[in-house]
Image: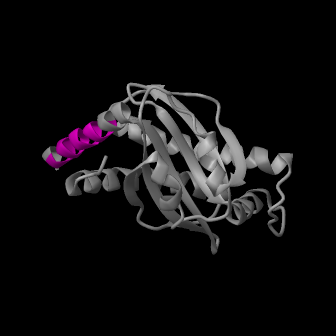
Amino acid sequence: MTLTVDQKDAVTELVNIAFSRTAAALSELTGNRVELTVPEVSAHPLSWLVPALGQFVRGDVATVHQIFGGSVSGDAFLLLDIDGAARLVSLLTDAGAPTREMGASAREVLAEVGNILLNACLGVFGYLLQVRFTFAVPRLHLEALGSMLGTLVIGDDELRHALLAGARFRVRGSEVTGCMVLVLGITSLDLFVTAIEEWAERTATES
């Protein structure tokens, strides 16, 4: 599926609102101002996802997955490069210099942060689009970017597409590059984009 210009503008506007709420949640968690770049939005067949993610992260990555269901269902995940994930954990725990070798406690912190940020983002989607989601327990994976696709969970009977929203954010002067990715079946992707178009029309009418 390729987004039209109007669809991409509407998705970008919605994602920008959701990411701003997510950045606010991260700022509250760290006690520091979070600077966020304008999200870059694109839609891809799942087989094209890894090359598309390469503009944001490379090598080993940390992903926190949030499986969601409802009229729109799929796998949302927060994707961070390993160094950025280590810096983020260090900021949250005052653990000193960040390290790529994250132990059990660091992994728990990262999983909880991912859970909070993903729920903040999906909560905005659900509220503005008037879509109700159900959530599974989030899962953390540390792996090479090329292996990441194997950790995605989605119904086997649907074609898979990914809605990629990438943004860089800076916390206390430390750049942490992250992406929010929604992996949806083609039916859910159509419903999601349609809901965004309806939201954009309501917003234009009310303004």
Any magenta on residue 201?
yes
Residue 21 seen from this side: no
The majority secondary structure of the magenta stretch comes to helix
Write the start and end of the magenta stretch as one range: 192-204
| Residue occupying the far left of the picture | 205
Residue 106 seen from this side: yes
Residue 150 figure quarter: top right
Q: Position of residue 175 (x, y in %)?
A: 61, 71
| Residue occupying the far bottom of the picture | 173
Please tell me which residue is depicted at 71% across the width and 61% down the height of the picture.
82
Residue 112 against residue 26 in the figure, above or below:
above
Q: Position of residue 148 (x, y in %)?
A: 63, 49
Please tell me which residue is depicted at 67% across the width and 38% down the height of the picture.
139
**Total tally of numbered discs in the picture:** 0
Q: Nearer the viewer, residue 7 or 27?
A: 7
Please tell me which residue is depicted at 34% across the width and 50% down the height of the picture.
14
Residue 126 figure quarter: top left
Q: How is the image coloured?
A: one colour
Relative to 192, 31 lies left or right: right
